[in-house]
Amino acid sequence: MCTLQQRGSVFVLTLTGDGEHRLGHALISSLRSAVASAAEAAAKAGPGAALVTVGEGRFFSNGLDIGWAGTSRARLSELVAALRPLAADLLALPMPTVAAVTGHASAGGCLLALCHDYCVMRGDRGVLYMSEVDIGLPLPPYFMAVLRAKITAANALRDVALRGKKVRAAEGKEMGIVDAVYPSADETAAEAFKLAEQLAARKWDGGVYASIRMSMYPEACRSVGIVEESDEEKRKHFASKL
Amino acid sequence: MESNKDLCTVERRGRVHLITITGAGEHRLNPDLLAALRSAVAASAGAGALVLAAEGKFFSNGFDQAWARTAPPHLHGTMDGGLRALVADLLALRMPTVAAVTGHAAAAGCALALVHDAVLMRGSRGFLYMSEVDVGIKFVDFVAAVLRDKVPDAAARRDLVLRGDRVAAPEAVRRGLVDAAIDGGPEDVVAAAVAEAERLAARGWDGEAVAEIRKAAWPQLWGQVKDHGAGPAPAGVRPRL
């Protein structure tokens, strides 16, 4: 399902196998465990860590496990609800995060990528694709909140959400969604790792990093269920750092 | 306590009210400087536009942690409270505002520059730098709101606040952070800012309309600061639509 490796200061989260990496209960659960382990290990090691998420095979992730959900609305709702805390984990993660989009990232899979601070993507194949409009499903509120937080050019948001555009890496870069484009999956993964190393080398305090990130996307954070830190708590932190 | 005229000067150039933070230091935003700036802003009544500039290598290097280290913790709030009030005053100001970023603008100093309607920056020296991530300081709510409202592009904002980029003027223009990069020395930046302010003043806009439109344009930011400023002057007779 997924593995977590630590290579120096970088945690590499890999969606394993040649399949679609459909986000069902088991994979979501494994991802949450892995992300929590990374956070715990980083807390022990001190400042200077980063996470890279990468997919093996043709897919980054093709979204929620709608095969399992079948025609059951209840099951689909369950999966939507199950993914939400993973999105929260990533948005609150006390370290920089990089999505290495090494294959198709659709719907929930695209959302997963967008929950990272940086997206690097292969240019030779693969698309970012919010398929919901084509399938006939509304976007869950927290999906839309994350899209609105990360895709800030109005026509880009329109194209991704309302037109079901299949966005290739180069275009994603023009739209401000993708930070860098590389010729192949391997190079994408390697460069994502390098970027993560560079970010980790800045030795940012993880708690501060996460706090600043969350203050940039308050609506998305509220939407995924993150409780906002009070100004009083921040002030205490400020005083403690003098 | 130093008097206002030591910490910043005010002068009129035509219709422009020019405030200059004085001295060769970092212009750290401590309660004294913030109070002086608030007075200077209040003294703009009757002008057609406001420019905020600074002497020396720095526009402002942010909050004064050295002051905070010696001040009792219950007074720390007067520092970010002072900036919150200054931001409220600038947002509610009945005339266009222009920041002349003559030197480095970091952290709260960068946020202060961005609050202005227009930002002109020295082309060859100085950078914008949201240093908080590097220094390990969390954002106060209204500073986060300045960044969200004034740097709407997600990637540009992320690079500034989550990567601690030091952004020089040409790049700042490209990223949409500032309006123009000005060649020459600090005096040239001030002259260009004053010229821009004079052009804005020449539009003859009704001050109350400017203030109301501005507050409505940045609702997240205004919402965070609105109860902290100097408050409205007596209302004019112009009816609201």
Image (cartoon, coloured by chain):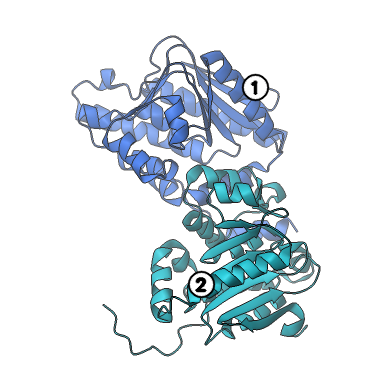
Chain colours: A blue, B cyan
Q: Residue at x 54, y 45 (%)?
A: B156
In this view of the protein, which residue sits in the foreground, B60 or A174? Answer: A174
Q: Is residue A143 above or below residue B20?
A: above
Res B111 label: none
In the picture as drawn, the residue positioned furthest to the top comes out as: A18
Q: Residue at x 70, y 61 (%)?
A: A239
Res B199 label: 2
Does residue B76 show up? no
In this view of the protein, which residue sits in the foreground, A36 or A115? Answer: A115
The amino acid type of the residue labelled 1 equals Gln
**Which part of the image, by quadrant, shows the C terminus of chain A?**
bottom right
Q: Mark 1 points at which residue?
A: A6
Residue B110 picture quarter: bottom right
Q: In this view, does A202 lie above or below B89?
A: above
Q: Residue B52's x, y, as percent?
A: 63, 72
Instruction: Classify mark 2: helix, strand or loop.
Output: helix
Q: Residue B161's x, y, as percent?
A: 60, 48
Does residue B46 show up? yes
Q: Residue B92's x, y, as percent?
A: 47, 76
The amino acid type of the residue labelled 2 equals Arg
